[in-house]
Amino acid sequence: MRPNRMTVGVGAVAIALSLTACSAERSQPTDSGAETQPGPSTAAPTPPPVSSATPEPAAEQLEYRDGIYAARGWYGGLPSHHDVTLTVEGDVVTAVEITTPAENETSLGYQQRFAEALPQAIVGRNIDELDVDRLAGSSGCSEGFMDALAQIKADAAA
């Protein structure tokens, strides 16, 4: 025997009402004896306390010792070189000096232009971020600088 739709609908409503009644809050009397109506809570959750103190920065982990370091960097098919002196403070290059020892006028011109442009390219930057490729029209001079830089980083490693 199949129940009719009316019986099923009434049964569903009865179940829903009984479940709702089980979850409803009971009215509570107040100090004055009046009853309060249940409703949504208007109290917001209390956020965790926030510290107003600024945290101390962690001690900086430097990879290189501060100091003045010098190295000779070699480059090119003919043995050409630069003598490079870097000042390092807090892993940052603060000064650079580079020689221009070429005897050939063309090579000397490249070295001099490279030496003039180098401080603007590296001073104030982290030593690990230096990657001089082609500077002031010279790629060979940058190879010599990068060779010297590798030696300086090895010498300055903390």
Image (cartoon, rainbow, N blue to C red):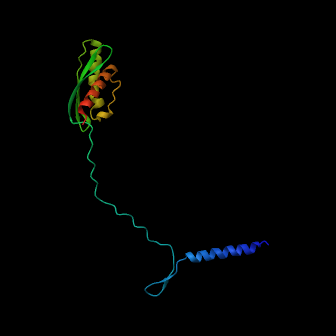
Q: Quadrant of residue 89?
A: top left
Considering every residue shown, the one lying at the far top of the view is 104
Q: Position of residue 116 (x, y in %)?
A: 26, 24
Which part of the image, by quadrant, shows the N terminus? bottom right
Q: Position of residue 46 (x, y in %)?
A: 40, 67
Considering every residue shown, the one lying at the far right of the view is 1
Q: Position of residue 84 (x, y in %)?
A: 24, 25
Q: Please tell me whether residue 9 is drawn above or below residue 98 in the rendered image.
A: below
Asked if residue 118 lies left or right of residue 24, the reply is left
Asked if residue 4 lies left or right of residue 63, the reply is right
Q: Quadrant of residue 137?
A: top left
Q: Count all numbered tags in the image, as a single digit.
A: 0
Considering every residue shown, the one lying at the far left of the view is 68
* Between 5 and 135, the one nearer to me in the picture: 5
- Residue drawn 62% across the image and 77% down it: 18
Q: Please tell me whether residue 104 is drawn above or below residue 144 in the rendered image.
A: above
Which part of the image, by quadrant, shows the C terminus? top left
- Residue drawn 27% across the image and 16% down it: 108
- Residue drawn 25% across the image and 21% down it: 82
* Between 144 and 41, the one nearer to me in the picture: 144
Q: Quadrant of residue 135?
A: top left
Q: Please tell me whether residue 15 is drawn above or below residue 72 in the rendered image.
A: below
- Residue drawn 21% across the image and 36% down it: 66
